[in-house]
C-alpha cells in the first residue's frame, strides 16, 4: 500500500468514526463509554494522518 493509499484509507476510517459518533449521540440514551472509545480511536487516526502528511 502506498503512502497516498494509506492516507486515503485513514481518512475513510476517520469519517466512519465521525458518523458512528454522530449516530450514537442521536440515540435516546447514548453510551458515553462507546463515544469515548470512538473519539479515542478517531484521535489516534488523526495523529497518524498528521504524521504521514508531514513526510
Image (cartoon, grey):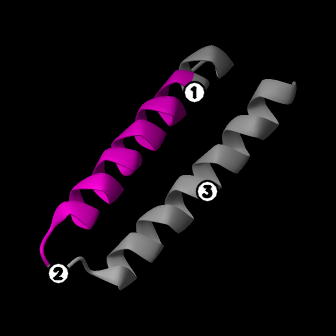
Magenta stretch in the rendered image? 8-28
Secondary structure, magenta segment, majority class: helix
Q: Nearer the viewer, mark 1 or mark 3?
A: 3
| Image coords of residue 7 (percent x, y) | 60, 26
Circle 1 packing at 10 Å, graded few (<14), some (14-19), many (20+), is few
Q: Nearer the viewer, mark 2 or mark 1?
A: 2
Residue hosting label 3: 43
Q: Residue at x 27, y 81 (%)?
A: 31
Q: Secondary structure at mark 1?
A: helix
Residue 4: which quarter of the image?
top right
| Image coords of residue 16 (percent x, y) | 34, 42
| Mark-to-mark CA distance, 3 and 2 | 24 Å
First in sequence: mark 3 vs mark 2: 2
Magenta stretch contains residue 21: yes
Residue hosting label 1: 6
First in sequence: mark 2 vs mark 1: 1
Q: Residue furthest right?
A: 55
Residue hosting label 2: 29
Circle 2 packing at 10 Å, graded few (<14), some (14-19), many (20+), is few
Q: Is residue 52 above or below residue 34?
A: above
Q: Secondary structure at mark 3?
A: helix
Q: Secondary structure at mark 2?
A: loop
Amino acid at each position: 500500500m502506498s503512502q497516498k493509499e494509506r492516507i486515503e484509507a485513514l481518512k475513510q476510517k476517520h469519517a466512519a468514526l465521525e458518523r458512528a459518533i454522530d449516530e450514537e449521540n442521536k440515540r435516546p440514551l447514548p453510551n458515553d463509554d462507546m463515544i469515548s472509545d470512538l473519539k479515542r480511536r478517531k484521535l489516534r487516526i488523526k495523529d497518524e494522518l498528521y504524521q504521514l502528511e508531514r513526510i
